[in-house]
Image (spheres, helix red, strand yellow):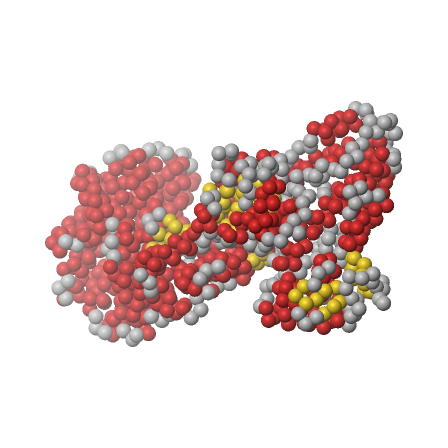
Amino acid sequence: MSRLEITTFGVPHIKIDGRPIEQLSSRKAQALLIYLAVTRQQHSRQALAGLLWGEMTETKARRNLRVTLTRMREPLENHLIIRRRSLLVEDANELWLDVNEFETCLAPANPTLEQLQRAAALYKGHFLDDFVLRDAPLFEEWIRPLQERYRQMAMEAIYRLATYHTEQKQYSTAITYANRLLLLEPWMEEAHRQLMLLLALSGKRSAALTQYESCCEMLLEELGVEPAAATVALYEQILREEIQPDAQPISVETSTPVRAAPVQIPAAVKHFVGRSTEAADIEKALCAADSLPVQALVGMGGIGKSSLAIQLARAVQKAFPDGVLWANAASSEPMAILESWAAAYGYDFTRIADLESMAAAFRGVLAEKQVLIVLDDVTSVSRIRPLLPGGDQCRVLLTTRDQDLARALNAQVWPLRELSPENGRLLLSAILGQNRVSAEADAADEICALLQNLPLALEITAQRLKSRPRRQLAEMAQRLRDETQRLSLLKISDREVRISFSVSWEALDAERRRVFALIGLFNGRSFTAEAMAHIADMAQYPAEDRLFDLVNLSLLREEEGRRYRQHPLLADFAREQLGEDEGEGYGRFASYYLHFAQQNQHDYDALRPEWDNLVAAMAAAHAHQLWQTVIDFADALHDAWFTRGRFSQARIGYKWAKLAAAEIKSPKQHADSCFYWGLACLEQSHYEEAISLFNQCLAEYQRIEDLAGMAKVQANLARIALNQARYNDAAELFAFSKLIKEEIKDQTGIAEIMKGEARLAYRLGDYAKAYEVGCNALSIYETVDDKLGIIQTLGLLVNSLIELHRRGDDRLALARSYSIRALSLAEMVQDQGELAVARYGLSRVLTLSGQYAAAEEEANQSLLLLEKMGDRRTQAAVLMHLSESYFYQKNYHAALKTAYTANPIVSELNAKDLEAVNWWNIGHFHNALAEHDQAKAAWSCSLQVAQEINDQALLQRLRPLL
């Protein structure tokens, strides 16, 4: 009969009569045979299918088992007993199994030398070392406690052999065994100490001292501890040459080694950053006698709970002298965990049949011990209750996504958030190197922002970039901007953000899944329960309950103001789950925010937190061709866009509205949308685009004979001509528009044109006329109570009075009164653009009054508003004013710096009037610093521009200087 040989220590080998079995090339087939041989029991087919194909359905698992048995039947017919419902390996003389002989050798309390040597020879590596199976978590759980048990048995045998050969002065052989011990457990301090002694006794003093250094490094790196006093004492003896070769007598410890306290902490996290404040607080809680026995790290998948748990376990290890136990609570069965932990303390629990008895037995093991238990990825209270210790000196650290679960265990909850932007960038630098990240700092910051500093996502992205040294960070940032594809980018090897999220998704019931998926429509923006209730077509209270559930499961975050927010990457994942609900979901999303916009058109405080959602809802309506909804959005948001200076949003919104009007074939709405799109461009000084749009809508107004539309287009084309110093064109356009306004008896429109004519007079240097015409316009505005017109005209009057004051007509007090009134009205109507202009006017008045600090404060406040809105022309004007203010204070360097900051803006805008004046100012600033050549060069530039626009007043002032 053939002989079956199975080797399981190290890489497994299966042979019949000394030859490998070709039909057993499959790892699942090898695993099946090894399991049957080691357990020496009969097993049902159902149990074996679950053991090896546990991640599959029962039908598929049984089919795979049948296929595997078909391949095994022929070569193993003399050894494998295959029955209809069960299997076993025939335990006869024709079967040799290394673990059987290994256990036989070490069964006696005091094995012979030959038995110890044979056991050591058999142990060629850990039991089924690196024998990994896919889809077989139960098989992995079966392996783990056996690996630990056999490792402990092997270490004890090898330690005895090392001790025996030391006593016999067979130092070379003893050193071999001591080195084998360190291969099995590099941090076993007794083995390091024994090897130091053996090397010293062998006359290798330098090697003994080097071994001490290796011991110190290993203990510090792996356990974070210093060597024991006995190790230090031996080192000092060797250092002082007190241990000589062949010294008599030799004192050697002959008992079995003191079992090292188990330290099951996974390898240190290579690139751990941040969390220092939380870590310090949690460390204190773990070590404090009066703290809760269970501490829980709670957060979404990928947030770094396990990494922080590893860091914490290493940091507090010294406080738990009896060991640190670790288990993955989600993937391992409680009985397998307890067996493994018991084996770490030298106990064999494999014969205890039920979980309750095993849990009680292990609590007895820990009764007098000071142990830290770390339970990673806890998903069920009932699964981990048997793993909790009963002793007062033990502590439990667990990680979970479920706040309610942590509270059910009476744990102190430590919520984990994303990394700070600084730590996010630090994580990229730790993996990619500081130089590479610094070289593309903006791209690095964008990557962190796009991933919202989720540690797992950042690490995967950095590792992908590290493996592609020529790829730029900017390229990766560009790819991550695509919300439909970025989750697919966030995977490397066996790590994937999508899989991390799937774990939470699969734990939800149908209703919570639907709500979670619909939250993805917000794409990481904050929202209210009321909005979610409408989108999900639920009553508000049930919707709030579902939101609270998702908060507790770390799938959502609650914020101030009863608002909620989902991590953007979770939102990407959520939208992938929408399926058929997507179209309807976006429709309800758009309808809710349209109604909200219509209800709160002028309630800017209500609109403020919803702006991003309003734009997204309008975009959704555009994308799903809800054309009337798009137009209704533009109508509802018009006043808010222009009053609050949200011109960029207005440009996008009216672009969509123009397309929508074309689709529903509404010429009037098409022309109006085109006009307001152009008006938003004008407010941001994008003149060429504005002119193109105004000309388009002018032609359309002419086709439909809309006189009011034609007039407002001409008036705004005049504004552009005025800003570009095309004064004749501006005068003609104002005149044409005024004729139409008078024909249709539009008093407000007439005041608007008069205000424009006053601006034209101001630009031409006729400040008295500007003031007079402006007062007439103000009178009309006050009659019709047009507050916006009043504010704008008051600003014009302030500027006119300032120039008249400079020419000897001292009405500065009136200018101050007008500027304060304009500021008050702008605050009342909450118009950000006019508020900025009013602050600018008040700053000019304060400067002429010598109140420079107050003037600078108003100017800086104005600049902040203008930068947000994108009004670059007024921004340049304020910068020029600030430079003049610095000049009056004789701070010439600051004046120059500020004036040169304004130069590229006026040049880009083709604002010749401002450019000419700014070069005039720069010349004076250089002259004040005795930089006469630079002053003349600046005045020459001013002269050239003044000649282009025929600014006679400025030309008269320039000619004497050149």
| Placement of 436 over or under 249, stated as above or below | below
**In front here: 718 or 94?**
94
Taking the spot 17% from the left edge, 66% from the top edge, the residue there is 740
Q: Position of residue 614 (x, y in %)?
A: 33, 59
The one nearer the camera, 562 or 711, is: 562
Tell me: 871 left or right of 93: left
User: Which quadrant does the C terminus fall into?
Assistant: top left
Residue 88 is situated, as x and y percent measured from the top left of the image, at 72, 64
> Of 664 and 218, which appears nearest the observer?
218
Looking at the picture, tell me which residue is in the foreground, 515 or 167.
Answer: 167
Taking the spot 22% from the left edge, 67% from the top edge, the residue there is 709
Q: Which quarter of the image is occupied by the N terminus?
A: bottom right
Indicate whether 648 appears above or below 821. below
Task: State the image coordinates of residue 914 (x, y, percent, origin top left).
Answer: 33, 49
Left or right of residue 471, residue 202 in this image: right
Q: Residue at x 70, y 48 (%)?
A: 149
Q: Is residue 916 visible?
A: no
